[in-house]
Amino acid sequence: MTANTQPLQMHPAPESVTRKGKSAGFAVANVDGNVDVRTPLSKRYAHVPGKHLPSLCRKLGVKFAPALVGIKGTRKDGDSPVIDGVVVSARVAERVREGIAERACAAAKKAEAKETREALRAQREAEAARREYEERWAELARQHGWVQRVPRAGSNRVGPDLLAEPPLELNTAEEWARLGYSVSGEPAGLHIRPGRPAPLYHRSRASVTPRAKSRQPAEQLWRTWRQQYPTDLLAATKALQAANKLVKIVPDWRVFSHEIYSIKDTFIRRWLSPHLVSGRVSRVETSQWWGGESRTLYEHHFLVDGHEVCFHSYERPAKLDETPGANLRQYGFRWTLAEIPDLRWHELLRLLRWVLQHVLTDATKVPPSAAR
């Protein structure tokens, strides 16, 4: 159906021409049953824009005509009218608008009720799946003598076989994948979490192998990492923090731990010492590996560009507090999945090596007064 673009008949008419049941008895409609609102309407009529208004007008018992707001298409391919809302008598326009508002409110309530029903159904299904999955894994855990891990925050199910903070090297397959490793073999534990428990794999009891190493140049890795922080020193310090934590987790930690701890000591001596806030004694260690000699582990607290940073090292800080430092078997808190750095372990190590050679210089050191 093509639109008739002839001038509107704004004078009263005995009966408008209708097509396919449109707007019977509406005086200002054209031969196609529409009202062209591109030209001013008489004060006796009002344009109410919106979708699906003919059915609402019929429900309200209001005479209407579809409102023509434009023409689309070409004369060659055939044009068609663009309809937006209806034209009604000015006396009932407000009634139609109220009907639109009531319809929208009812639709919103209906959608909200549907969303609530679907959420409750999904919750029931997830709870049933969780119970089934948990019972199955709990039975396997009892058979194999596994430990079970609960989330860091929020679970009260802590008993003899549930460890709130297990060793850092005990991770799910998804966590190992984010760290850059593939796992296979027997699990060593179970992670109890909302939804479905997940098996835990220990670096010594399962096959935890590094994935293909990145070929991205170290300089490009640094540029990507550097964009997250305001200064070179803070970016390098955060990279060192991540590497210092990862070296306690990764399977090949024995190969790289000496290098990472050496890099950390270099950072503390050359660049972080001006930012020292306090130093504390964590413990005095004695071992036959050092010929029976003792050494002191210190806790260093720094403030770098407004960020508090803590490292443990055998480097003696320039000043010591009387408050003792933390004396733990294993330092570092477990990462949540979202906290795991975007760079993999080997990428962080390459980045730190490059930073030591090309980025951090003596000019990077900032006096404490300037750092504040």
Image (cartoon, rainbow, N blue to C red):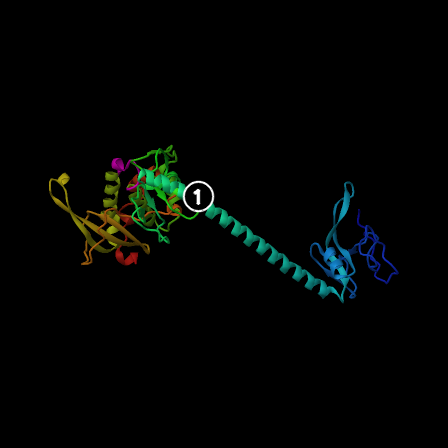
The image shows residue 178 at horizontal and vertical percentages of: 39, 40
Tell me the quarter of the picture where residue 99 sits: bottom right
Question: Tag count in the figure?
Answer: 1
Residue at image coords 78%, 41%: 76
Q: Reply yes or no: does residue 14 show up in magenta.
A: no
Residue of label 1: 132
Can residue 351 be seen? no
Which residue ends up furthest to the right in the rendered image?
Answer: 14
Residue at image coords 55%, 53%: 117
348 relative to 372, above or below: above
Q: Residues within 10 Å of mark 1 (few under 14, many from 20)?
A: few
The image shows residue 131 at horizontal and vertical percentages of: 43, 46
Which residue ends up furthest to the bottom in the rendered image?
Answer: 91
Q: Which residues, given as a range, are shown in magenta?
A: 248-256
Residue at image coords 87%, 59%: 15
The image shows residue 132 at horizontal and vertical percentages of: 44, 43
**Closer to the camera, 9 or 123?**
123
In the drawing, does residue 164 fall left or right of residue 38?
Answer: left
For numbered disc 1, what is the local secondary structure?
A: helix
Tell me the quarter of the picture where residue 372 sits: bottom left
Can residue 256 be seen? yes
**Amino acid at the residue labelled 1:** Glu
**Closer to the camera, 84 or 329?**
329
The image shows residue 28 at horizontal and vertical percentages of: 82, 59
In the drawing, does residue 88 fall left or right of residue 210?
Answer: right
In the drawing, does residue 6 fall left or right of residue 159?
Answer: right
**Closer to the camera, 154 or 236?**
154
Tell me the quarter of the picture where residue 87 sits: bottom right
Which residue ends up furthest to the left in the rendered image?
Answer: 292
**Closer to the camera, 350 or 35?**
35
